[in-house]
Amino acid sequence: MSGSICQSCKAKTGGARLCDKCTSEWRRELESIPGVRAALQSKAMRQASRPQGGGPRKGTPPQPVDWTASMQLEELDLWVRWLATLADERMWCVHDWRRCLAVAVTGLDRIAAKSHEAGYARDSTHSMLARCERLCDPPAERRPVGDCPGCGQTLFACAGDATVRCRVCGTVSLVSVLEESRAERIREETAWHEVSGTPAQIARWLSAMTGVHVTGRRVRVWIHRGKLAGDSLGDGVYRVSCRALLDALDTPLDRTR
């Protein structure tokens, strides 16, 4: 019987889909998710400037959002919701990750005993947490460049690397292709985000986000020429959308630097 062998470690069971050892390890991993998520959220947001009602009179330097970590955070929440559906199918309509996690942990014994997806769910927990932890503590001198097309793991590369090999599945990818795909995902994610600050502060934010050096003078000219639409908050402070900034940067370069 398929239920007599643990779907994760292949040990014999008493008819359950997972053995007691794998179930206990899985439970400990699930219980670590709030801490992992908090670290990931902190890295993702990094005090990013968000629009506030009325806006401050003086700008504060907006910090670049770590969009790789932000997207990983969304993926983690979606995965927790899927896990909760293994215990209760109605949880697919619930978007509160805490509630979903509580349902998954409470129903873990039932999932381990009966779910046909128990083995995959247990193993994917380990992979998911490993991805999150690598983003929170990346390898020295390496930066995230995109996701492996073979297994979805986040890949890191050093400056000047042309290719990168996934340590999980061995797939070799071109860094330029990964970065182009990541840039497109970032563009989609930033559609509704805004930053506020002086042209110099906005320029520093854009430079940090894209790796392209942009000066405050260039941003100021964009605004004055109507190339970059933004709301004036007074005292030389503007509020602009990330999408508008990226679109302005993508247009043919002028002589203003």
Image (spheres, rainbow, N blue to C red):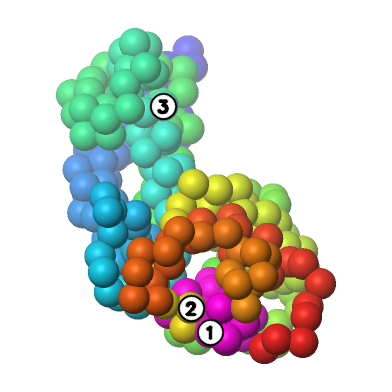
**Crowd tier of the residue under label 1, counting other residues whose Cα lies within 10 Å: few below 14, some 14–19, many 20 or above:** some
From this viewpoint, is residue 169 visible? no
- Contact between labelled residues 3 and 1, with CB atoms less than 8 Å apart: no
Find disc 1 in the rendering and name its residue: 216
Q: CA distance from mark 2 to mark 3?
A: 43 Å
Part of the protein shown in magenta: 201-220
In which quarter of the view is residue 38 placed?
bottom left
- Secondary structure beneath dot 3 equals helix
Amino acid, disc 3: Trp
- Asked if residue 157 lies left or right of residue 54, the reply is right
Find disc 2 in the rendering and name its residue: 199
Amino acid, disc 2: Pro
Q: Is 219 one of the magenta-colored residues?
A: yes
Q: Main secondary structure of the magenta part?
A: helix
**Crowd tier of the residue under label 3, counting other residues whose Cα lies within 10 Å: few below 14, some 14–19, many 20 or above:** some
Query: Residue at (21%, 27%) from the top-left corner?
Result: 99
From this viewpoint, is residue 82 visible? yes
In which quarter of the view is residue 147 placed?
bottom right
- Secondary structure beneath dot 1 equals helix
Residues 164 and 257: in front is 257
- Asked if residue 234 lies left or right of residue 102, the reply is right
Q: Is 122 one of the magenta-colored residues?
A: no
Residues 15 and 78: in front is 78
- Contact between labelled residues 2 and 1, with CB atoms less than 8 Å apart: yes
Instruction: Tell me residue 236's x, y (percent).
Output: 40, 76
Find disc 3 in the rendering and name its residue: 82
Q: Taking 70 as reference, is 5 above or below it?
A: above
